[in-house]
Amino acid sequence: MSLLTVDQLSVRYGDVAAVDGLSFSVSKGESVGLVGESGSGKSQTALALLGLLPANALVTGSIDFAGEELIGKSEAALNDLRASKIAMVFQDPMQALNPFMSIGAQLACILSQHRIASGREARDKVISMLERVGLPDAPRQYTTYPHELSGGMRQRAMIASALLAGPDLLIADEPTTALDVTVQAQILDLLDEIREDTSLLLITHDLGVVAGRCERMLVLENGRLVEEGSTRDVFRRPQHKHTAALLCAALTLDRADIPGRREDEEILAVNGAEVSYNIGGGRALKAVRSVDLTVDAGETVAVVGESGSGKTSLVRAALGLIPMQEGRVVFCGSTLAPRLKDRDQGTRRGMQLVFQDPAGSLNPQMRVESIVAEPLVVHEAGLSKDERKKQVVAMLGKTGLGPEYLRRYPHELSGGQAQRVAIARALILRPKVLVCDEAVAALDGTVREQVLQLLRQVQDETGLAIVFITHDLAVVRAISHRVLVMYLGGLVEAASNETLFSTPLHPYTRALLEAVPVPDPDNAGGRTTVTGEVPSVMQPPGGCTFHPRCRHVREKCRADRPETREIGPTTVSCHLAEELASERR
């Protein structure tokens, strides 16, 4: 018997249909994946189920939950259902959690509002749930505020709040999109373990997540349901062309389409980089610890690691955006000044950066033409307005955007279009080095593939050197020539793409690879093999910094920091590298 039955649900804003005639059901205890690209209507559907749409949304159709019609219910009646019968895990817990209330106080409110428990009983229930979701030292976490927790810990607190009142249906809206791959695996494992008989509606654009976690899946396109079936059948025999396109765009670890050409011309070298941040009270946070990075013309070097690994600090120091306490940067054979303001114009135009969030890096008050032309105004002031426009049109054309986009503002662009504008702005100066900082992290599979293909094409045509920062190993596999793996500010492994993915030597690298969800229901992967959070950079563990989370740990790992050494074609910092390498033979 169905717990939830949705029949001909439509959500309209004026003449625009965000959801159009959607029908589906979820049975008790069932896990169902709702899949689609941005703008397909996934989140609008979830918000409609909970009655959380804005006042200007026109909702028609039927939403039957356990025999009750939800469309048209009063706010008071819906409040009785929320959390107690239907609960939701939002994509960004920092936005969903109240920053002015401690975690414990927020969760206790759920129990009191639904008259489940109050006072000490409510506190005990909250602490028990925080323990169930894996928050360490739950009594202490009860008193912490959202900003004091890591992303993974905030998401665990969000899941605890959703499950606290024992709902029958849990809606998880992109619950792991912004998380590192290891934390993502832990959160998804957690959902599997503790939801028991609770039904799950998992909303995501990641087919690897659906493959390993959902029994059935629904595929949306432009607000319409285009395919439905068991996860295995949809993956094996997609019936709709949109589903087939999504599956084709899904990246896997065995899919290596290494781009461009390799040239033996070193463009950028960072030697012995040390980066620290002054955090007051005479204390310093050491974000990067003696790391080397080189990239040749026509080469893509990926820098990977969890949040807090130091990868962004490393490249921003190389670009002169933050100070480097030790080490040096060499660009095209010349040693650079540490600070960007002290570097000449030629160096500045030769090294460009594409940020993760184009919405935050594009000026909302400027049109696309002005945004892309701005670097030319600064670096090629002698160009006429017509000459600048001609170059802008040509560069936008290379990124797949026509002249009709020139007059648009950033808010009038999709996520993929905005990122293409950001890439066009970076490439219009014909740089020698392009740094991409999580540049495709927030993009859907098909849009991500288009952006990666664009970078491959430009690199092949111009010999562009690319430094690609990401936590997505599937993207690394698809685009990089070499890979650097960082952990707690240090380099733990470096090797060619093929070597690292076929014979990883460091336990941390192995854990990252094993945690990657695979878009294959019969071999979904994405199961956590490393536990716990990344230790504080302020107080890194003694010995090997990875030893508290390593399943192979020995006493010498706790006592002595391993030296970085060469083992065959791999550079690695691990006491047990030879032993682990022999196990794989």
Image (tube, helix red, strand yellow):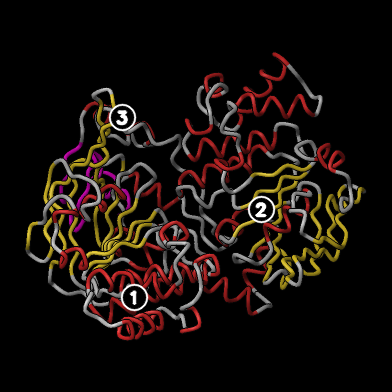
Of the two numbered discs 2 and 3 on the same chain, state the one appearing first in sequence: 2
| Callout 3 secondary element | loop
Q: Position of residue 168 (x, y in %)?
A: 79, 41
Q: Identify whether 584 is placed above or below 288.
A: below
Badges 1 and 2: C-beta atoms under 8 Å apart?
no
Q: Which mark is residue 467?
A: none
| Callout 2 secondary element | strand
Query: Given the image, on which type of amino acid does mark 1 rest?
Result: Arg
Q: Which mark is residue 456?
A: 1
* In front of the other: 162 or 54: 54
Q: Identify whether 14 is placed above or below 550.
A: below
Residue farthest along the top direction in this orientation: 120
Q: Which residues are magenta?
A: 562-585
Q: Position of residue 66 (x, y in %)?
A: 88, 47
Query: Given the image, on which type of amino acid does mark 2 rest?
Result: Leu
> Which residue is painted at 74% across and 69% down in the image?
17
Q: CA distance from mark 1 to mark 2?
A: 33 Å
Categorize mark 1 by other alpha carbons within 10 Å: few (<14), some (14-19), many (20+). many
Residue farthest along the left direction in this orientation: 334
Residue at image mark 3: 538
Report whether 176 appears left or right of 11: left
Residue at image mark 2: 202
| Residue 314: in magenta span | no
